[in-house]
Image (cartoon, rainbow, N blue to C red):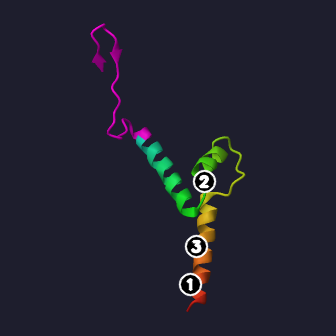
């Protein structure tokens, strides 16, 4: 906290990109994992989160897309032998 000359108190922002609580750290890690996984799979992370938060589930789960990519990768590698 910092007090200005006229007595107004305000909080300084933590610009070190560190979270204050364990819950915020876990939430941040989860969010970053979803964003990076979606990016690797070619999925728009913003659209994916907008699909999941209101429980629409119109888009496939990231786990399903990962399985699909693994199957595609395995079939491509076995055919090249």
Q: Alpha-carbon distance for marks 2 and 3?
A: 20 Å
The residue sitting at 71% across, 46% down in the picture is 56
Q: Where is residue 35 in the image (x, y as percent from the top left)?
A: 52, 52
Left or right: 20 as drawn, with respect to 49: left
Q: In which quarter of the image is the C terminus?
A: bottom right
Q: Name the residue under label 2.
A: 44
Q: Name the residue under label 1.
A: 77
Q: Position of residue 53 (x, y in %)?
A: 63, 42
- The span picked out in magenta is 1-24
Q: Which mark is residue 67?
A: none
Q: Does the magenta stretch include residue 4?
A: yes
Left or right: 3 as drawn, with respect to 53: left
- Relative vertical location of residue 45 with respect to residue 17 in this rendering, above or below: below
Q: Residue 70 carries which label?
A: 3
Q: Does the magenta stretch include residue 49?
A: no
The residue sitting at 70% across, 50% down in the picture is 57
Q: How many labels does the image show?
A: 3
The crowd level at tag 3 (other Cα within 10 Å; few <14, some 14-19, many 20+) is few
Left or right: 68 as drawn, with respect to 18: right
Residue farthest toward the top in the current orientation of the protein: 6
Q: Alpha-carbon distance for marks 1 and 3?
A: 11 Å
């Amino acid at each position: 906290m910092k007090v200005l000359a006229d007595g107004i108190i305000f909080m300084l922002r933590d610009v070190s990109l560190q979270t204050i609580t364990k819950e915020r750290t876990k939430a941040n890690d989860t969010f970053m994992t979803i964003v990076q996984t979606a990016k690797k799979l070619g999925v728009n992370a913003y659209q994916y989160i907008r699909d999941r938060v209101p429980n629409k589930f119109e888009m496939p789960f990231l786990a399903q897309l990962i399985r699909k990519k693994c199957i595609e990768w395995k079939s491509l590698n076995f055919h090249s032998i």
